Amino acid sequence: MAISVSISHITPITLFYLLLLLLLSSTVTTTTTSALNITSILSSFQNLTSFSSLLCSTSVAPDLTRRDPVTLLAVPNSYLSTSPSSDLTHRLPPSSLGDILRYHVLLQYFSLSDLRQIPPSGVLVTTLLQTTGRVHSNFGAVNITRDPLTNSITIQSPAPFSPSNVTVLSLIKTLPYNITILAVDSLLVPYDFNLLASETRPPLGLNITKSLIDGHNFNVAASMLAASGVVDEFEADEGGAGITLFVPTDDAFGDLPGNVKLQSLPADKKAVVLKFHVLHSYYPLGSLESIVNPVQPTLATEDNGAGSFTLNISRVNGSVAIDTGIVQASVTQTVFDQNPVAIFGVSKVLLPREIFGKDSAGVTSKPGNAVVGTTVQPPETSPSPENSAGFSGPASHLSSPPGFREEITSKGGRYRMQSCIVTVCCIGLVLVEIMKEKPCRIMAVKFLP
C-alpha cells in the first residue's frame, strides 16, 4: 500500500507571513507575562503600601510573579493598622505571616461579573498556601459566598464555624484573565493555623563564619568577620526582622585597587565597613529583585546616623545591583537563604563613600585618577507612584476606582483589536499564497505487509 503526501510550494513571502505570525504570538505572550509584577502594580495605590511591604518582607511577592492567573486579596492600610490585623503583623515572625499572606492569593482569576455570578452556596477556591503542603485537608482553600440581596462578597475558610472571614470592599485593579486585586477589610487566617506555635518558634542560630567557609571562595571575608568580632553582633540580630548579608568573594578582595587601603584601616572603621555589608532585615533574592524602596539603611547606618552608609539596591540587566555611590557590585550567588537569614555573594567589596570617598582616609588618591578607578553607572530608579484613586468603602456591591474600567477597556480593547486584525490579515495572506500554488507530490511512502 502506498500513501502519497502533497504539500504546496512555500514561497519566500509565505514564509515571511508565517514568521510574522509567530513573532506576533510571542510578543503578546511576553507582554502579558512581564505585566505581572505585583509590587509595581501595587505601587500605584498609596492605601496599599503597608500590604505591599509585607508581601516583599515575607518573600511572597516573588511567588506571585510565577503564578498566573491569580486573584489577590489586599488589605488597605487603614484596616491593616487596626485589630485583629495589626496584632498578627506585630506578633508573627515573617515565615508565619508569609503563610497567612499566601492564603490571600487565590489561584483563579475572578472578574467583577464572575463574582456577581457566584451562587449563594458559594464556590471553593484553592490558594497559594494549599500548594505549600503545610496545611491539613483543604484548609488551604477558601469558600467565596455572595449575598443575593446585597451582592456583598464574603470569603472564609471552608471549615464549619470558622472564626475568620473577610468582606470584599472594592475592586482595585484587574488585568483580564491574568490578575485581579480586591480590597478586603481584614487579614484572613486559615482554619487550624497554630498562632501560638508560630510565636514560640526557636531562632535559627546560624554560624555565619562556618557557612562562609563551607561556601568556598569566601575565606577572606570569613577571616575578617572572625577577627573583627562583629560576626557575633550579626548572629545576635538573626531574631526579629532577620538580616541580609552581602559577602564579597575572595576574587573581589583581590581586585581592590591599589589606592584602597582596607587592611590599614583602624579596627573601628574596619568594623563599620563590614557592617556596611549587612541589612537589618531578611530579604530573599526575589524580594531584592522587586524591592520597593531602593535606598536601604545598613547596620552601619544605625551606628552613624540616618542617611549615612546606605546602599542603593536595584535590578540592572536582569540581576540585583548594589550601588554604594563609588562602586557598583552585583549579586553573583546565594550562599544561604533560610528565614530569618540570607547570605549572598557579591562581585565587589562594598566601599562606603563616607570612608573611601575622595580625600577620605581610606584611600590614597593619585592626581588624575578616580577613587576606585571605575566608571559607575547610576542604578535604575523606580518611577514615582501615582496617587491611588481610593476605595469605595465596604459597599453592598463591588465597584471599580473611577476611570479604571474605561482605561482597561480602551487600552486593552485597542490592543486586542489590533492584534486580531494583524493576525487575520496574516492568515488570509498565507491562504492566498497557498491557493496560488499548485500542489506537487513530494514523497511516496510504501508500507510492506
Image (tube, rainbow, N blue to C red):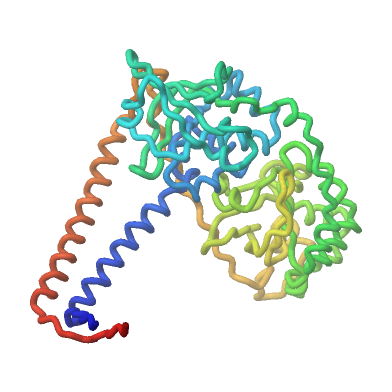
Left or right: residue 179 versus residue 81 is left
Estimate the x, y position of residue 448 in percent, counting from the top left.
31, 85
Estimate the x, y position of residue 175 in percent, counting from the top left.
36, 42
Estimate the x, y position of residue 41 in percent, counting from the top left.
44, 42
Looking at the image, the residue that sits furthest to the top is: 149
How many discs appear?
Answer: 0
Left or right: residue 442 versus residue 202 is left
Residue 376: quadrant of the picture: bottom right
Residue drawn at x 71%, y 39% is 241
* Up/down of 26 relative to 181, above or below: below
* Up/down of 378 relative to 286, above or below: below
Residue drawn at x 49%, y 32% is 48
Looking at the image, the residue that sits furthest to the front is: 449
Quarter of the picture holding the N terminus: bottom left
Quarter of the picture holding the C terminus: bottom left
Q: Nearer the viewer, residue 160 or 184?
A: 160
Left or right: residue 397 versus residue 336 is left
- Residue 284 visible in the shown view: yes
Q: Nearer the viewer, residue 114 or 58?
A: 114
Left or right: residue 401 versus residue 258 is left
Residue drawn at x 42%, y 39% is 108
* Up/down of 154 relative to 28, above or below: above
- Residue 46 visible in the shown view: no
Estimate the x, y position of residue 205 in percent, counting from the top left.
84, 45
Residue drawn at x 19%, y 76% is 14
